[in-house]
Image (tube, rainbow, N blue to C red):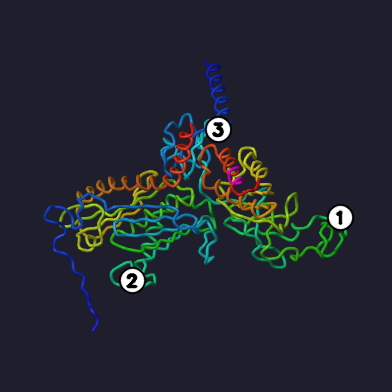
Amino acid sequence: MPLIIKDEYPEELFRKDGKRLDGRDIDELRPIKMEVGVIKNADGSAYLEWGNNKIFAAVYGPREVHPHHLAKPDRGILRVFYRMATFSVFDRKRPAPGRREKEISMVVADCLEPILFLELYPGTSFEIYIEVMDADGGTRCACTTAAALALADAGIPMKSLVTAIAVGKIDGKNVVDLSGIEDKAGEADLPIAITWYNEEISLLQFDGDMDLDEMNDFLDKAKEALSKIHQMQLETLKSKYIPLQGETTNEKEGEK
Amino acid sequence: MENETNEEFIEKNTDEEDIEEFGDDETSREVVLPGEVLTEDTKNFLPGRGTIYNSERTKIISLNIGLKQISKNYINVIPLRGFYTPRPGDKVIALVVDKNPVKYKCDINAKDFGTLKPKNTIKRDKNRSYRGSGGGRGRGNGYSREEVNTNKFDIGDILIVKILSADRINKPELTTVGKYLGIRNNGVVISIDPPKIPRVIGRSGSMIKMLKNLTKCNIFVTQNGRIWLKGEDLAHERLLIESIRKIEAEAHIVGLTDRMQEFIMNEKKLRGLE
């Protein structure tokens, strides 16, 4: 007799003290940890821990396109491979890429394309491999953020970084950074990505119901959270080079 | 009025040139990131290498992760990471990965493989006649028919080649005819990040001279991030490789040449290589 576990969601998504189930305020982010240069053989790589999400991103390119018929004679192409590990979710995830993986790969690629100069590399491809080791809501946003970090680490010329976050509505309240359970049991969910080059929205998906005033509120809340995450991205990239610089200058001062 | 402004302009220029001359190791360099605003003063500065205007042309922003550098009125960003783009005239280290009767395919650490045609591997006959030495296909062009084949090199050979032509669309074409070019049968080849090659060479070759003198090794540094080296013995070679790795890791820090000299002297004492 197979064991059947039904998805059960709590009736209330807020605790009695007004905080969310994981103890956050309505506009508080989950703890985020970023690292670049984690995969030695890749041209650029990044690791991102966003709450319970654990994501690796690796960038290769520019290099020859395989299969060759995908190559464009006038510009390069950007290919994203979003995959989830079999152990990343509660039920075992079947390893073959399905509809969801293909969609998210396309969404992330479309979201990153405007910041790259693909027309400078005709007949080539940039490839981003994203592996979700642990998933807990908002993986497409976390993947976009990690992929932008990996691209910058690879030294590919780009106009700016890209940052993404999901905002949504749970139990009638507008909240920032939905976790897995809030995403499933909540009323609305709005992943949003921004390119900092001219502060344009690069990704906007929507699921659920809301009115226009709420939409505006979502965008304001998202902007605030996005700039916080962008700051983290910049610090992560700089931290790869600055500690070394600091070390040697300190040594010199010590000698004097 | 015009004259005065002109003079000012010239003076300013010469000052900055002086700074630039000595500036390679002395000026503190700032690490900038993609999208970072370098200046909002678009009247006095122009975007140079690795930078662009924003869409309203009110700011100059960086495209790479790199070091900010101001030369005259251009703002440049010298990348810390990146890939090699072949340019005609570059001498690079190539690895033969495939061959067929009409060409060799060489890995030159770029997005495309380079092609090396057999006619570019042999010297042209100087006193070529109308008939040529071989006749047939080779008639009159100075190449003898017997030599125009791909028996000279094998798959896996390491060659130093010069790039004859390279652009965005076509595959780069290579040659092994020229000074220092051809097959290398001995020595070690290591590869580092291509943007860090200028630091291994140093300002007007100061770093590479120092490395050569202190480790008594022959070094050939190429633009695609590969370095061929051969020393008296293994210990010297190993010291040199470690030094190059250290240069690669600390490429963005000021005063590199002096620190490397100190490092090598110390290591030589420790290892008893004096």
* Residue type beneath disc 3: Gly
In this rendered view, identify the residue nearer to me: A9 or B55. Answer: A9
The residue singled out by tag 2 in the image is A93
Who's the residue at 52% across and 67% down the image? A67
* Residue type beneath disc 2: Lys
The residue singled out by tag 1 in the image is B128
Could you tell me if the residues under marks 2 and 1 are in contact, i.e. CB atoms within 8 Å?
no
A256 relative position to A10: left or right: right
Read off the chain for label 3.
Answer: B
The residue singled out by tag 3 in the image is B23
List x then y, in percent, for residue B110. Answer: 58, 55
Read off the chain for label 2.
Answer: A
Q: Which mark is residue B57?
A: none
Mark toward the start of the polypeptide (3 vs 1):
3
In this rendered view, identify the residue nearer to me: A104 or B187. Answer: B187
Badge 1 element: loop
Which residues are the magenta region? B265-269
Q: Is residue B255 above or below residue A6?
A: above
Occupied quadrant, residue B19 = top right
List x then y, in percent, for residue B139. Answer: 84, 61
- Nearer the observer: mark 2 or 1; the answer is 2
Who's the residue at 71% across and 55% down the image? B175
Badge 3 element: helix
| Local crowd size for mark 3, using a 10 Å CA cut-off: few (<14), some (14–19), many (≥20) | some
- Nearer the observer: mark 3 or 2; the answer is 3
* Residue type beneath disc 1: Arg
A27 relative position to A249: left or right: left
Spatial CA distance of label 2 from label 1 is: 71 Å
